[in-house]
Amino acid sequence: MAHIDVFLMVSTLVITLFIELLGRLQIISGVSKVYYYLARKLGWKKLKIACKYPKAIKNFQTELSGINSKEEFSRWAKLNRRLEKLKKEHAEAKKNLTIEAVKFQIGLSIAIYVALYGFLITWALLYRSSPTFTLPPGFLGPFESFLSMPGSPLGTVSLVAWLFVCKRVCGWMFRRFKFSKQSSGLFGGLLGGSGLDLSAIFQATSTVLPPEAQSM
C-alpha cells in the first residue's frame, strides 16, 4: 500500500528551495552594507582613513578653481601635485576598505554555507531510515534498491533520494523562469556551485562604499 510522509516530503522541499533560492540572490551589496554599517558604528580605522580624504580633496579643488594657472603657475602646480597625491591616497584607502569588506563577506558567506549544508546533512542523517514515500512492491522496478539508499526499506524512496529530486526540480524551475544563477556572486558560487569571480565581487563591493568615503 502506498504511503507518503507529508512532513518529510514538504519540509525537505522547502529546505532545498530555500538553499537554491539563496544561491541565486543578488545579495553581495547587502552583505557589504552590513560590514560598512558595523564599520561606521564601531569606528573601524580603515573607514575613518577613507573618510578623511573627500573633504580635503574638495577643499583643494575649490582652491585650485580660484587660481589662474597662467598667472600663478607655480602655486597652481604645487597645489595640483598635492591634490593628485591626495587622490591616489584616497583611492588606496578605498581599495583597502573594500578588501576588508570582501574578507568579511567571504567569512560570512562561508559561515552561512557551512550552517545551511550542516543542517541539511544533519537532517538527512536524522531521517536516513525514514522513507519519504512507500510504494507497492515492484512499483519502482530495477530502481528499488537505488532509491531506498542509504537506509530505507526496499520499495521506498529514501530522504536522500528525495533530496536529490528536490534539488534537481528546484534548479530546473529557477532556470525555466529565468531566475538565473549569479555566476559572479559569492553566495551563488558557494551554494550554487558556479564558481567564484573575486574581481566581480570586489567591483560589486566597491560600488556600495559609504557616501562619506566616496569622492565629493
Image: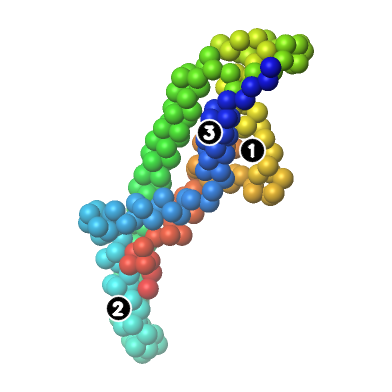
Q: Quadrant of the rendered structure where residue 57 is?
A: bottom left
Alpha carbons under labels 1 and 3: distance apart: 14 Å
Instruction: Provide the residue designation for mark 3.
Output: 11
User: Between tags 1 and 3, which lies in front?
Assistant: 3
User: Between tags 2 and 1, which lies in front?
Assistant: 1
Which numbered disc, 2 or 1, marks the residue that appears first in the sequence?
Answer: 2
Q: Amino acid at mark 2?
A: Asn
Instruction: Provide the residue designation for mark 1.
Output: 170
Q: Quadrant of the rendered structure where residue 53 is?
A: bottom left
The structure residue drawn at horizontal position 68% and vertical position 42%, both measured from the top left corner, is 173
Q: Secondary structure at mark 1?
A: helix
| Total number of numbered discs in the rendering | 3
Alpha carbons under labels 3 and 2: distance apart: 60 Å
Marks 3,2: beta carbons within 8 A:
no
On-image quarter of the C terminus:
bottom left
Find residue 174 and report its horizontal and vertical position in percent.
Answer: 65, 44
Instruction: Provide the residue designation for mark 2.
Output: 59
The structure residue drawn at horizontal position 68% and vertical position 13%, both measured from the top left corner, is 155
Residue 65, can we see it?
A: yes
Find residue 137 and report its horizontal and vertical position in percent.
Answer: 72, 11
In terms of depth relative to the viewer, which is nearer, 71 or 124? 124
The residue most toward the front is 1
Find residue 201 and report its horizontal and vertical position in percent.
Answer: 49, 48
Q: Secondary structure at mark 2?
A: helix
Q: Amino acid at mark 1?
A: Cys
Relative height, residue 3 to residue 192 (above, below):
above
Relative height, residue 40 to residue 126 (above, below):
below
Q: Amino acid at mark 3?
A: Ser
The structure residue drawn at horizontal position 39% and vertical position 35%, both measured from the top left corner, is 111
Mark 1 Cα within 10 Å, few/some/many (few <14, many 20+)?
Answer: some
